[in-house]
Image (cartoon, rainbow, N blue to C red):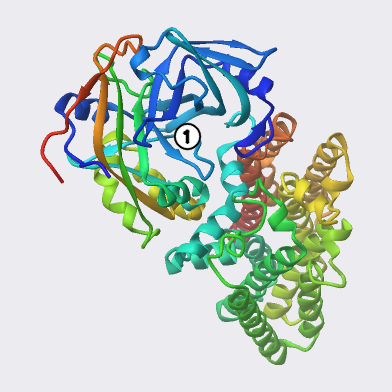
Amino acid sequence: MSPVMGRMAPAAAVEEATRYGHAVVSFLDDAGYPFSVAGDFTADVVSATVEVGPIDASVLPADGQQVGLLFSHIRPQPGVGYDQRRYVNAWGRAAVTGDRVSVAVEAATGWDEADVPFFEYAERTVPEAHRYMGEVGARPRLSAWWTFFLTTRLPFLTATIVPVALGGVVAARDDAFAWGWFLLAILGGILIHLGLNMANDLFDDASGADAANVTPTPFSGGSRVLQYGLVSRRAVVRAVAVCYGAGSGIGLGLAAARGWGLLWIGAVGVAISLAYSAPPFRLVHRGVGEVVTALGFGPVTTLGTYYVLAGEWSGEAVYVSLPVAVLIALVLYVNEIPDRAGDAAVGKRTLPVRWPRSRVIAGYDVGVVLAYLLIVVGVVLGVTPGWTLLALATVPMALSVHRGLVAHYDKPYELMPAMQTNIGLHLVTGLLLVAGYGIHLVVR
Amino acid sequence: MATPGVLPERVAALLDAALVAELTVVDGRGRPVSYPLIPLYDGRRVYMTSSALFSKKLRHIKANPRVSVALTDPVGVPATPFARATIQGDATVHDGDLHSDWERLLPLWRAKEPVIDKFVKMRFGIPLFFERSVIEIAPTRVFYWDDARTDRAPEVLSLVGSS
């Protein structure tokens, strides 16, 4: 069956109909009103014919009249809504014999949410919604808060907050922490990150990657605000300019106050955030998005924060950022898995597009092992405090993600819990590293 | 156009129990096309809502307002005893405010499907689904099978009152 109330071959529709309990025959009565009556039925797949009855002759269609057949199964579930939704619409001419009507199916459409999940069905009909809303002069909207929340992809700020916090605790270990500078570093980092999120949306919209993606999730496929018409491109462009402008302004101010060395790292951060998806570089299209992401949300941010606080560079700050750099790269990596069909369609050749399933999953496993190894080696070499080994407590989360990838690699919506756990893995591991430093500072 | 009226009590009771009904409209080729939807009844009119995402039926109704609502599925119509009915009527599409107008039906919807409140709170997750038109159906004639046996002639019930 082709998706989205797709056309079905008559024989396929009749075969599908055999899964249903009853048929509903519809036709136009003498006054031109539709009339529907349910009945038991038998199906002949070979001739693509359905015979419905017995039905009282007073409510049968006329012989030769065009009729519709509906086969429907929807199971209401209290507290949930509906599940097991599927139905088939078929059309043909009625051949009435006694109390039965036989229909040789000429055309049919159908949908089964087991084949095309409801959310994918909804996504595929977005153009239909735009057409209709255009006809009636309507525009979709959400509250200002939810529009802001979705457009900026606010929850992904954990990718910035964790490395900034790490830079802060390393600076505290060196007795260089100050709240004022720290908060400015966070603010600058957040603004650049929000600008990056929205710029990425603009470029993915322009390339067609997001439109080609019919299985977006809350963790992948972009914010969808442009695809849904919630926000205009112009508004997003303005927001990107404001975020990058304000973030860069804070960076320049910090460089002037704390040392011009910050200018270089800030420039690298801004540059790679733009080159990530902006032409002509489009690094994520070239399969190096993970490297760029790791660099930007790892050493660049942590070292930049440390420099703001201490006014100098730190090898420890670079090192402690490496595990979270790997883990944030793995967040991008896993989130690219459900997007790979849409990405491939527009030439966005991420690693999950390039690699087979087995290699992608192995790549995840290698990456997460590397992250934990870096944590252990850091302590063994005396670079990081022993208490940072607390971060190893997230190993069960990593195992859960692995199991999710194995079980649901090709099912975007079933993969969502694993994607969410993977995001949590980065956050919790990072926070435990921060906590490890915090405990060290208290007990030293 | 036929004269609309109020549904007899036993048909109203069936509608009140129904979680799924089959709305049949007439498409541009004169074919009947059926859609399973949740029916809502306020004592005078049958209402259904349809997202802008699935708006073909709305165009069909605007071109030809003659529709029927059938109650046929024992799972979707958990009435005791189970009966079947087909309600014919004239439909109007209300699409002046897709964002909020349908919310006036929430009390009726909530009574059948309490989980709708949870879905509405999460409308930010699927915003276009919640841009919805209201289909208002004024009943004109009803066919009723008391024991759901469609191999027997239905009662053709007169409608009570007037619009």
Q: Which residue is mark 1?
A: B32
Which of the pair A419/A176 is nearer the observer?
Answer: A419
Above or below for A284 versus A305: above
Q: Is residue B154 left or right of residue A1?
A: left
- Crowd tier of the residue under label 1, counting other residues whose Cα lies within 10 Å: few below 14, some 14–19, many 20 or above: many
Above or below for B140 versus B155: below
Q: Position of residue B30 (x, y in %)?
A: 49, 39
Secondary structure under tag 1 reads strand
Which of the pair A100/A325 is nearer the observer?
Answer: A100
Above or below for A150 versus A369: below
Chain at tag 1: B
Q: Quadrant of the C terminus of chain A?
A: bottom right
Task: Tell me the kind of residue under disc 1.
Answer: Pro
Which of the pair B85/A202 is nearer the observer?
Answer: B85
- Does residue B21 appear in this view? no
Which of the pair A235/A369 is nearer the observer?
Answer: A235
Residue shown at the point (62%, 50%) measured from the top left: A428
Q: Is residue A180 left or right of residue A303?
A: left
Quadrant of the image occupied by residue B15: top left
Quadrant of the image occupied by residue A104: top right
Residue farthest to the bottom, as pictured = A256
Total numbered circles: 1
Residue shown at the point (79%, 71%) measured from the top left: A278
Residue shown at the point (27%, 11%) measured from the top left: B147
